[in-house]
Amino acid sequence: MTPSLLALSAVAIFVVIVLLKGAVIVPQKSEVIIERLGKFSRKLEAGFHILIPFIDRAAYTFSLKEQVIDIPPQVCITKDNVSVEIDGIVYLEIQDAQKTAYGIDNYLRAATQMAQTTLRSAIGKIDLDKTFEEREKINVEVVTAIDEAAMTWGVKVLRYEIKDITPPESVKRAMEAQMTAERQKRADIAASEGLRQAMINQSEGEKQKKINEATGQAEQVTLIAEAEAKKIDLIAAATAEGIRKVALTLKEAGGMEAVNMRLAEQYITAFGNLAKTNNTILMPANVADVAGMIGAAMATVKEVKDVKTA
């Protein structure tokens, strides 16, 4: 190979190396930090870029996607001095690649340590029972603490979630016994409330029954009294009508003779029925004097007629 060909080959290799060193392809949702002679120069977004070989270099490459950090389990002590093991997950994303590159050495490790520290502090402020009830409050407190520190890292903490809270076995057994007692207590209360309500309903039913019976008896007595009053009114009206008709008959021709005949018939009929019963009765002294008896009765009728006429 001639010297000229060697020179051309060397130049071609050099050009290829320069192109390889200067060409940079940035993926979507990523940023590359470019340093020129060791100093920050610019940020490259997604696309194809050409650098100055041996002067510019891609110092850092960051993904702008949301990242998930698994926080390792750690032992935390509650306010009532119970040790519980808690682990969680942090969701964050890089919003300023320059701050992330130069603001902190390892933002993932820093976020993990900050989450653990804040979690221990939050758990230490509440009792064991509250740790299960106030997960949302604890999550918000951890997010707020990490986010305040991460602002200088160019990182935004989106949320934090507690995965598991594992108390000691002795505490588990005590909590299970407490829950069993609580459920039994609620069952006993529900049963007693049901019995109480049943007794109240029964007494209310008995009370209403007595009221209904008293009301029915009062209405029955009222109806009987009204019926008796109506009966008396009807009998009185009938009697008055009969007396009126008798009085009108006496005024007519032959009325007195008809009355005499009717009294005689009734006297004889009543006298004849005396022998059919065993009753003891008082008899007038002149039983045989039928005419005298009828005459006395007619005299009374005549006096009444004369009084009404007058």
Image (cartoon, grey):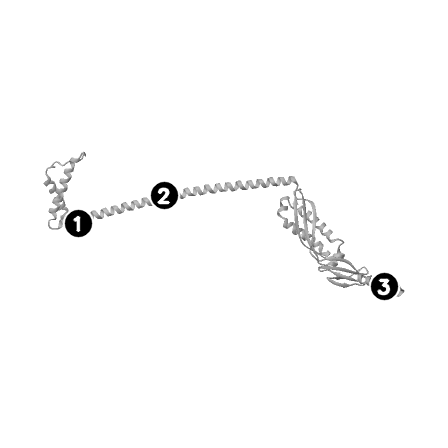
Q: CA gap, disc 2 to disc 3?
A: 126 Å
Residue at image position (28%, 46%) is 227
The residue pinned by badge 3 equals 9
The x, y position of residue 139, in whole percent, is 65, 50
User: Pointers 2 and 1 in contact (CB under 8 A)?
Assistant: no
Query: Where does label 1 land, which residue?
Result: 245
Question: Is residue 32 among the parts visible in the rendering?
Answer: yes
Q: Earlier in the sequence, mark 1 or mark 3?
A: 3
Question: Crowding near pointer 2: few (<14 within 10 Å), some, many (20+)?
Answer: few
Q: Between 46 and 182, which is closer to the camera in this rendering?
A: 46
Q: Are marks 2 and 3 in contact (CB under 8 Å)?
A: no
Q: At which x and y percent is residue 73?
A: 69, 46
Q: Amino acid at mark 1?
A: Lys
The tag earlier along the polypeptide, 2 or 1, is 2
Q: Is residue 131 left or right of residue 2?
A: left
Quadrant in the rendering for residue 81: top right
Q: Secondary structure at mark 1?
A: helix
Residue linked to disc 2: 214
